[in-house]
Image: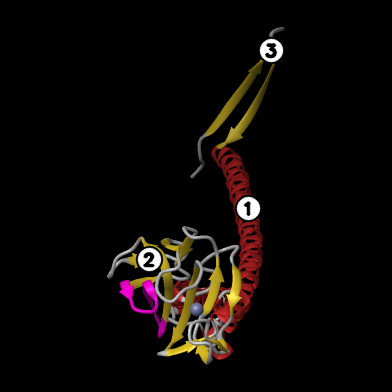
Amino acid sequence: MRGRHYNIFIITEKNFYKSFYLSDRTIFSIFLFFSIITTLAIILFIYNTNVSITEMKQNIAEEQHHEYLKKIAKLKNQILELKTQLQNQIHFDNKQRNFLKMASIHPDIWSMGIGGRNDYKKFANLSFYNRKTLENLNKDIDIMKGQLTLRERSIREIEDKLIQKFELWKRIPSINPVPGSEISSGFGYRVDPFEKDVRMHEGLDLSAPKGTPVYATGDGVVIFADWNIGYGYVVDIDHGYGFVTRYAHLSKILVHEGENVKRGQMIGRVGGTGRAICPHLHYEVIVAGIKVNPVNYISFKDVVID
Ligand SMILES: [Zn+2]
């Protein structure tokens, strides 16, 4: 069966025309041809677009990876800095504890830190390299956290020790009770000014005009403040740790029994009460019930704080 056919006329402005004879098949072929071309063009466009998207994705991924590496490198540097600072702290901790005669913390304990470990399973979906990198960084951070906790505890211990030492330092007799006075009679055997025979002088005589201020030589509690035959007006201070000081021949007492006194606090005035020929302070230092030479407790350098 013959198919239909078409005459196509082309008319120009000058009435010139041409005619074409086209069969169904030819028209179909032309359509087919253009359809194939169009389809190919679309396929090519899609393919090119896909390539571009893939490339873009790769670029983004590379860029992101690059950024990630940069961030990791920065993090590593920061951790390294912190590690150095912590090492300095550990070194300082050892020095402080040595100085205060405290047992130092063993290096193994420092290197482990203390406290719990994190669960690193959260990195399981990463590549091996990334997982290892992040795991190592996290381990470093965990160790440092532990070390910081340890250092904090150590600082508290050091602080307690310092407070103890400071408490002891405040209490141990360690100044001249009559600054600027002269030693008129030392500690030891001497000819007694009253009896004229050799007797033990159990204190230090500090010569000063009557009324000169007398100061407590360390923090403590007044355990006696009254008249005592021989000593005249006398003040006894208990400093704790086995230390007692005695201030005798006073012309005036300025404290009362049970009163807490501080080092350098004025407790009385020099006089010549009791067995005294002229105004002076008879000063005694008693350690664990034994009278010792007060000279050793006047100068700071002789005071042992342990
Ligand atoms: Zn004396």
Instruction: Specify start and end residues of the magenta stretch as a single range.
Output: 224-243
**Residue 223 in view, yes or no:** no
Q: Secondary structure at mark 3?
A: loop
Task: Say which residue appears at 62% left-offset and 30% top-offset.
Answer: 21
**Residue indicated by mark 1:** 56
Q: Secondary structure at mark 1?
A: helix
User: Within 10 Å of the Cα at label 2, are there few (<14), some (14-19), or many (20+) other Cα atoms?
Assistant: many
Which one is in front in this view, the residue at disc 2 or the one at disc 3?
A: 2
- Does residue 86 belong to the magenta stretch? no
Disc number placed over residue 12 in the picture, else none: 3
Task: Say which residue appears at 45% left-offset and 65% top-offset.
Answer: 271
**Residue 36 in view, yes or no:** yes
Q: CA distance from mark 1 to mark 2?
A: 83 Å
Task: Say which residue appears at 47% left-offset and 79% top-offset.
Answer: 284
Name the amino acid type tagged 1.
Met
**Residue indicated by mark 2:** 261
